[in-house]
Amino acid sequence: MSDTPVASRDLPATSLLNRRTFLASSTAAALGTTLTGRAASSKPSTMPVTRSAAPKPLIVSTWPFGRAANDKAFATLQAGGNLLDAIVDGISVTEHDLANHSVGIAGTPNAEGVVSLDACIMDGPTHKCGSVAGVEGILPVIKLARAVMEKTRHVLLVGDGARKFALANGFENTPMPVPEELERWKAWKAKQAAAGPGSAPPLSHDTIAMVMLGANGDLAGGCSTSGLAYKLPGRVGDSPIIGSGLYVDNDIGAAGATGIGENIMRFCGSFQVVEFMRQGAHPRDACAEVIHRIQKKHPAGVDLAINFLAIDKKGRFGGAGTSDGFVFAVTHPGSSQVVQADRVPPRH
């Protein structure tokens, strides 16, 4: 089955809201059949353009790997689990995916060869949240973020304190990085030494951000990443920061982000998306408008590498980004697909 979306489109701001074509991939491989039980098709198809609400429950998450996460989350809901159970189970799939080098066990290490993980979770009905940052050797970190929310009076635990909390609450040590990533880091380290001081590390910045609308209309969300490849030790991006990498308002909607965290967290990006939805904007429009707002603070032509997705209380969803090929996974009764987000080109 193909997960490949249609090519990204450079759309001017005036046409972002009315020229959209989504590519529907076939049913997620994690289930092997469609969510209605029909046999999976190997041929991608084009989903009709629509701004109407999707059936509930509705799950939306970043990148093609989000589809397997969505399908696991959907299965958890179908089995009677609540929204937080589904968020944890879904994102845990990505965190344990050895083919994913931007989240979880196979994540890319920092500049010292150490994998440090960030995650957060937010519950719409209670407006409670939990986050962890710079955690080493603990999986699943999305589950750890939930433990912070439910077992402490805090929102964010970091570094060694978060690790000690995890071990005291039944989490086990998980060796990282995986051998493949360790060898890549060694090669990068050797190249850096040859290039001399000041040479720039590669920019790798994928994240899984998942937002969810339950059958009863409640909302929740979660986010997890290993952060920027070969980052400075101690660096934390937007992903575990409530309002930056993730924000949920049970009265309005939920939004998540992926990209270069520094360019998202300086603007409380996901919070802004939800606030535009509060003013009545469609989720797609809200994502694009936040990008426009951020672009105005930078010189023309700068590629910020920021992407947002969102759902609202009505069951509408959308996404927009500056990156070529930003796609997101959408799952609801009868459908599990990877679709193309609107591309917002740099300001000229």
Image: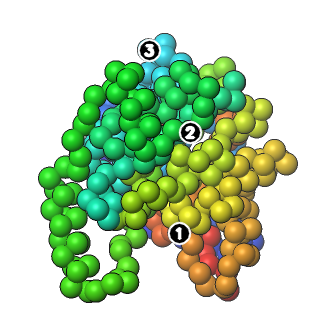
Secondary element under disc 1, as helix, strand or loop, is loop
Q: Whole-Å distance between the Cαs marked 3 and 1?
A: 37 Å
Mark 3 or 1: in front is 1
- Note whether 213 is above or below 80 in the view shown: below
Q: Whole-Å distance between the Cαs marked 2 and 3?
A: 30 Å
Q: In which quarter of the image is residue 89?
A: top left
Q: Is residue 256 visible?
A: no
Q: In which quarter of the image is the C terminus?
A: bottom right
What residue is rendered at 33% in x and 84% in y? 197
Name the amino acid type tagged 3. Answer: Ala
Name the amino acid type tagged 2. Answer: Leu
Residue position for label 1 = 305
Q: Position of residue 286 (x, y in %)?
A: 72, 55
Mark 1 or 2: in front is 2
Q: Earlier in the sequence, mark 3 or mark 1?
A: 3
Residue position for label 2 = 156
Badge 1 crowding class, 10 Å Cα cut-off, few under 14, some 14 to 19, many 20 or more, is some
What residue is rendered at 44% in x and 37% in y? 161
Badge 2 crowding class, 10 Å Cα cut-off, few under 14, some 14 to 19, many 20 or more, is many
Name the amino acid type tagged 1. Answer: Ala
Residue 343 appears left or right of 208: right
Residue position for label 3 = 79
Q: Closer to the camera, 28 or 200?
A: 200
Q: Which of marks 1 and 2 is nearer the N terminus?
A: 2
- Note whether 195 is above or below 244 in the view shown: below
Residue 74 appears left or right of 21: left
